[in-house]
Image: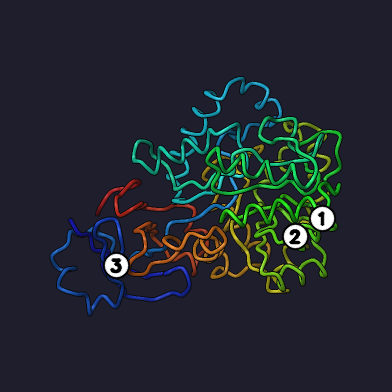
Amino acid sequence: MATYLEDVTLFDGRTRRAKHGVLVDGGRIVWVGAHARAPRGARAASGLGVAGRAVTPGLIDAHVHLCFDGSADFAGEAREMTTDAVATVKAVRNAARTLDHGVTTVRDMGGRADAAIQVGRGVAEGRLAGPRILAAGYALTITGGHGHNVGIAREVDGPDALRRAVREEIRAGATAIKLIATGGVLTPGIKADFTAFTPEELAAAVDEAHTWGRVVGAHAIGAAGIVQAVEAGVDSIEHGSMLTAEGARLMKEHGTFHVPTICAIRGMVEHPDQVPAYAVEKATMIADLAREAFGRSIKAGVRIACGTDAGTPFNPHGNTPLEIVRMVEWGLSPLRAMRAATSDAAELLRLPEVGSIEPGKAADLCVYDADPLEDISAVLTPRMVLKGGEVVVGSTG
């Protein structure tokens, strides 16, 4: 049965249009245009009672960790995750929670074994509720590098070993690849700006992943590590907290996306009495730098993709709308922030069927009472969410 969203203010993933309509059939968008010129099929379709409201594409979060819940002690939660089954149960629950906030696609950037991979398959097969999931499987880090202590990264050294590790993650079902190019906040004993892999190691991993058609994201906080990762050809820089003007220009030249993960930083610095002291210290050190780095990305014209790092302390799954609001607070226009969470994120993830409202695309849609381009806080409270044309959150009328 076809469905028609009538007389709405439409953000199609790129531009805003008033008094439009969207016709959905078979899980796909079949027509978009002025409501006054709706085709005969729209008149015969069932309505959703959304006239006068705002409609956007389903949101995309390019950086989550479905195996983690966002508890205060990330490493402690990892220690309690004693089996792959526990990780999978968490991922199932967090995938379902994600939909409630209008997020219909995510990229999991490191989990235990193949938990997120299998949950992604379950969602794709209709057996589980959740967003579309690209999953990196294990992240790849150097011996003793960031992430080695929480069970979501495999330690690997040398260009040939990196190639083999990429192949093995893909054999296990990985649909994305995560490289940990610097130190990080949540690993004790390693500085956040420590430069990890060598240029040769990064280049080998990126080349192998791209040969297999996988998108590559690099966790990179320090300035030198960011530059190395960009020069190696990664598709996105995750965090990028110490990005310099030179690094931003390089990212612009290479077409590298910046995924800022503002919610991850804020989650830690805003709860100093509950998050482990070593993490608070490092997060506090980079908080202002991260905001300045984001400003450099904006000024340089670097493409931005929305990503929360959900699962880190006080950063629960479904925080994507809050990340959009915070990107605006940090200087991005509402239009660019919404693009970062829709069409631009889809471009980064190489997912042409999502991220915009056009004929032939998947009918992943969000309905809001107010227009997020006029009041960005409207994105925090979706009235209705459709995934593949089915209403998965909210009700008609």
> Residue 263 vs residue 189: left or right?
left
Q: Kindly indicate whether the residue at mark 2 contacts the one at mark 1 (C-beta within 8 angstroms).
A: yes
Q: Secondary structure at mark 3?
A: strand
Q: Secondary structure at mark 2?
A: helix
Q: Identify the disc placed on residue 232.
A: 2
Q: How is the image coloured?
A: rainbow
Please name the residue that numbered disc 1 is placed on.
Answer: 199
Compute the Cα span from label 1 to label 2.
7 Å
Q: Is residue 254 left or right of residue 372?
A: right
| Front-most of residues 100 and 250 | 250
Residue type marked 3:
Val
Q: Mark 1, residues whose alpha carbon is within 10 Å: few (<14), some, or many (≥20)? A: some
Contact between marks 2 and 3 (CB within 8 A): the answer is no
Q: Position of residue 149 (x, y in %)?
A: 75, 30
Using the numbered discs, state the Cα–Cα distance from disc 2 to disc 3 in whole angstroms.
42 Å
Whichever of labels 2 and 3 marks the residue nearer the N terminus, that label is 3
First along the sequence among labels 1 and 3: 3
Mark with earlier residue (1, 2): 1
Residue 22, disc: 3
The answer to whether 237 is drawn above or below residue 79 in the figure is below
Q: Give the CA separation, mark 1 to mark 3.
A: 48 Å
Residue drawn at point x = 72 percent, y = 41 percent: 268
Which quadrant is the C terminus positioned in? bottom left
Label 3 crowd (10 A; few <14 / some 14-19 / many >=20): many
Give the amino acid at mark 2: Ala
Q: Nearer the viewer, residue 98 or 358?
A: 358
Q: Amino acid at mark 1?
A: Pro
Tag shown at residue 371: none
Residue 119 screen position, x and y as percent? 46, 36
